[in-house]
Image (spheres, rainbow, N blue to C red):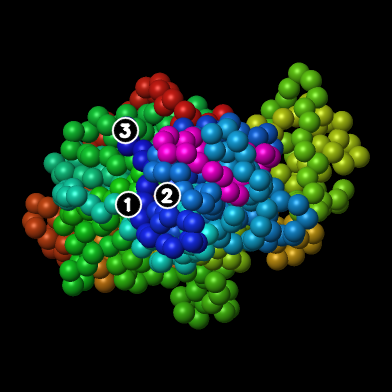
Amino acid sequence: MRMKRKVVLSVCVALSALSARAVSAPEALLLIEAESFAEKGGWVVDQQFMDQMGSPFLMAHGLGVPVADAKTRVEIPFMGAYPYRVLVRTRNWTAPWGTKDAAGKFQVLINGKALKNTLGTQGAEWAWQEAGEMWLEKGTAEIALHDLTGFNGRCDAIILVTDSKFVPPNDVKALEAFRRERGAITAPKGDVKADLLVIGGGIPGVSAAITAARLGLKVALVQDRPLLGGNNSSEVRVHLAGRMSLGPYVKLGDTVKEFGPAKGGNAQPASQYEDQRKLDAVAAEPNIQMFLNTRGVAVEKAGARIAAVIGRNIETGAETRFTAPLVLDNTGDGTIGALAGAEFRMGRESRAETGEPTAPETADSMTMGASVQWYSREADAPVAFPDIAWGIPFSNTSCERVKMGEWTWETGMNKNQITDFEHIRDYGMMVIFSNWSFLKNHAPDNEGYAKSRLDWVAYVAGKRESRRLIGDLVLREQDLTEPKIYPDGTACTTWTIDLHYPDPKNTASFPGEEFKSIAKHKPIYPYPVPYRCLYSKNISNLFLSGRSISTTHVALGTTRVMRTGGMLGEVVGMAAAICKKHNCLPRDVYITHLDELKALMEKGVGDGKTHPPQGYNLGGTLMK
């Protein structure tokens, strides 16, 4: 999908009396969104936190090696009576853990000349910082971001302004209004209409979209990354878990088999996750319109129904208005549901509330965490790694003597997985870089690491839990273990009740700041998840899938794995087809058309074959 890239230019002309010998001079203000740079170089677009800090941004994810410059060109409207001030919205991402140096240093270059101030060194929060001043002539100028460290310097936006007193807004709402005024965010020009709108392109969302499309629905699939698959993409690299093709509906899972990768394993080379296969599977469906790099940011309501969802392109800022009688929230965070006012829950319920033996005595806000996975590779000769001053201190007793990290490298269980998520992801990267620096430069037995090269570190974190949207039925632990079979059982969940907790050994060295986890498993027999867990209790046209379906924290321990989610996505696609056929809502499928849903689940829509990959023609989107 080719996207237009733009630089936002707003020129404000104002007359000002300068002095007895001065003439009236115009003033200029240029706003340049970093994510819209024409050439990204080695910088990556990060949209994971735009709901909290206001925007996607560019990040220099170089694993300690400075990345190639990001570049774009702008039109300077005139040479002013004063030099252009250059303001950059950035932050020192390592400041929450100390002020000894900064990891993500970078410079702004204009026409190849560096401005005087090094950026990424101030402030733990996002804010505008002065990069310097420069006299610029009218005409085209090249703006570049020049990375100095390879350690995740980040740039949200750049302003060139001749007004010496101008202070840009930093509050998220005020900043959005400022961006709209200057065209950095552009309003929808028309509606994209569909029968089913799927927000989120993880495994369940793809399954639902393909299933609904094959049953005759027009589907709009909206995904805020360039790849599909969510945690199973090459950006996160979590394997598909859970069994498929089990009773009572053995055909459920056939669609997942068509586009899911053939191999398993966490934190493996990118090709193992077969990104192109997922894209090919969706592109092969004529009833699906796919919108990559587009994030659902707002909802319009009509009573208890979602009337429209506004999506925003993460590179251009162009918005699209999507309308559909049925909406599926597959965002993972229950974002669309929350925007619409859907009932949701975060954290752990109490034992008294749910009757679950595994629930804590007192309800709390603890969730399972997010993993930043990584691995190294062996080189033919010794490979250096920076001896960093800004990192978390490690010692012989606290370090992790490993050469890769997968699901157990998990952070943020005691933080809010939505509002604190940039902190959570950053801490995940921080401990990897800090531990690796210790192993390479200070560990007594570091000879074993001399030729090891840090080869891949995820910057898109693999999240397990945040909001759980509430449906007509909330699945509980005892439903799974007794078991209590409901009349609307659908696809089977087969994973154990798998709940994660901070690793006690890691807690001893890093109390309250753990980055390693343990898993506690409680076995279950294959259990058919009730259909009533797959739609919202109070938003009448909202389906649910993925880790946001209607369960308790404990029950989420089994339903959260991706093959199970994929099968439940197929069920949602089938239910959506019934809704279209009868002009009804998700709840009506349970009340009136349950036998019809059972017949569709019995038949399935997939061919049940594991198809060979179609190749890896993704250009720069594949990662090592």
Q: Disc 1 marks which amino acid?
A: Gly
Residue 609, quarter of the rendered image: top left
Specify few, some or many for label 1: CA neighbours under 10 Å numbering under 14, 14-19, or 20 or more: some
* Magenta stretch, main secondary structure class: strand
Q: Which is in the foreground here, disc 1 or disc 2?
A: 2
- Per the rendering, the mark at residue 30 is 2
Q: Disc 2 marks which amino acid?
A: Leu
Q: Disc 3 marks which amino acid?
A: Met
Q: CA distance from mark 3 to mark 1?
A: 22 Å
Specify few, some or many for label 3: CA neighbours under 10 Å numbering under 14, 14-19, or 20 or more: few
Q: CA distance from mark 2 to mark 3?
A: 28 Å
**Viewer-closest of 248 and 612:** 612
Up-down relation of residue 615 to residue 351 (above or below): above
**SS type, badge 2:** strand
**SS type, badge 1:** loop
Q: Which residue is mark 3?
A: 1
Q: Magenta segment: does it hold 285?
A: no
**Percent x, y of residue 427:** 65, 54
**Viewer-closest of 490 and 136:** 136
Q: Which is in the foreground here, disc 3 or disc 1?
A: 1
Ranked by sequence position, the earlier of labels 2 and 3 is 3
Q: Residue at x 44, y 29 (%)?
A: 274
Q: Which residue is mark 1?
A: 183
Task: Answer with left or right where residue 597 lies relative to residue 568.
Answer: left
Residue at the right extreme? 444
**SS type, badge 3:** loop
Q: Which residues are magenta?
A: 132-153
Residue at the left extreme? 582
